[in-house]
Image (cartoon, helix red, strand yellow):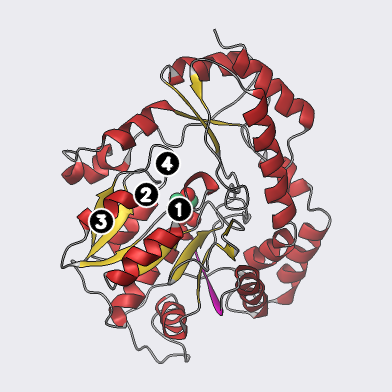
Amino acid sequence: MISFLDLQRINNSFEPQLSEEITRVVHSGYYLCGEETTRFEEEFALYCHTSYCVGVANGLDALTLILLAYQELGAMEKDDEVIVPANTFIATILAVIRAGMKPVFCEPSPETYNINVNRLESLITERTKAILPVHLYGQCAEMDVINKIAKKNNLKVIEDAAQAAGAVYKGKKTGNLGDAAAFSFYPSKNLGALGNGGAITSSDKNLADMVRSLANYGCLQKYKHVQKGINSRLEEIQSVALSVKLKRLNDDNNRRRAIAKRYLKGIDHPFITLPKVENWDSHVFHVFPIFCQRRDVLQSWLLKNGVQTHIHYPTPPHLQPALKEYEKHFLPVTEQIHREELSLPMSPMMTDAEVKAVIKAVNGFE
Ligand SMILES: *Cc1c(COP(=O)(O)O)cnc(C)c1O
């Protein structure tokens, strides 16, 4: 069986360094708010070419804290609107709601599966304060158009870069493509921790300081609580694991691209639509999506033929029970993507033989 994503194989490939670094933290006596997290923050800011990085507990908190920080700084208010892609992992939308703001759903482009920039301007109202594009499946959204529209309408641009650590859009890394960015280091992400983790990046000092304060009970100076903050910290153990893994992120992303190239070249089936890749630098293939009207039949067929797949995601956010106030929204492109998407195995540790076996199984679909 070819697994969808073998995290054990990925993390074993960082040994013995990974365990050595973790053991060092275990014996150090410092587990939170220490020098390992500071070091990782510096490394990741340098990697993204931003002035600041603030480690937080997870990707959802990273998104939420950016919006809460802008509210504290007076750039946004509760009930203001944030434009989000309608096809995303639910965290993007829950972050907006958790920050007391209103998500406005934008249909994706059927070509890129990312927010359809041609539809953005019609969604902007008096209350719109931000555009929150997601670099879905690891492919950068059309950031130059998004930034242009945002500038014209005085909006902030917040990247949901959870799936796209290391992607490069027109010479710039994700994390540095808007006013602020949120990352998740959930174990299966391209840069994955050994548990939860997240970060924000920005070159706006006020924003970075405010996120740091809000993430630590509203204080930058011990026991001086200026805001009603929350507790959202990146742990020291996760920080050393991320430092070790960050060194190989570019190589790992290149291996993902090489696998994607083989899939694109090798898969040829009348019932299957392959993703179009316009720019290889701006895609890090967190997921390799294929599309098929008989998706569920294809998934069982692949499983029977030794290939494990996943669906990203089976139900669009507006049709989830948690978001039933949005169930009447007319979002046919979003719904079609969720109905037809199937993610093939993708990991930097996949062998060429495994990639070949996946291609053979897909092409053999009856
Ligand atoms: C993973 C993910 C998140 C949330 O990250 P967590 O660390 O699980 O909170 C947010 N947005 C997108 C697009 C994601 O893929």
Image quarter (top left, top right, bottom left or bottom right) of the N terminus: top right
The residue that label 2 is drawn on is 115
Q: Whole-Å distance between the Cαs marked 3 and 2?
A: 14 Å
- For image coordinates 60% across by 73% down, the residue present is 49
1 or 3: mark nearer the eye: 1
Residue 205 part of the magenta segment:
no
Report whether residue 64 is seen: no
Q: Whole-Å distance between the Cαs marked 1 and 4?
A: 9 Å
Q: Tell me the chief SS of the magenta region.
A: strand
Residue 355 is situated, as x and y percent measured from the top left of the image, at: 71, 28
- Circle on res. 103: 3
Relative to 269, is 338 above or below? below
User: In this view of the protein, which residue sits in the foreground, 63 or 115?
Assistant: 115
Q: Whole-Å distance between the Cαs marked 1 and 2?
A: 7 Å
Where disc 3 sits, the SS reads strand
Marks 3 and 2 in Cβ contact (< 8 Å): no
User: What segment is highlighted magenta in the picture?
Assistant: 51-58
The mark that comes first in sequence, 3 or 2, is 3
Q: Whole-Å distance between the Cαs marked 1 and 3?
A: 18 Å
Residue type at mark 3 is Pro
Marks 1 and 3 in Cβ contact (< 8 Å): no
Residue type at mark 4 is Tyr
Where disc 4 sits, the SS reads loop
Image quarter (top left, top right, bottom left or bottom right) of the C terminus: top right
- For image coordinates 34% across by 30% down, the residue present is 336
The residue that label 4 is drawn on is 113
Q: Whole-Å distance between the Cαs marked 4 and 2?
A: 7 Å
Relative to residue 281, is residue 56 drawn left or right? Answer: left
The mark that comes first in sequence, 1 or 2, is 2
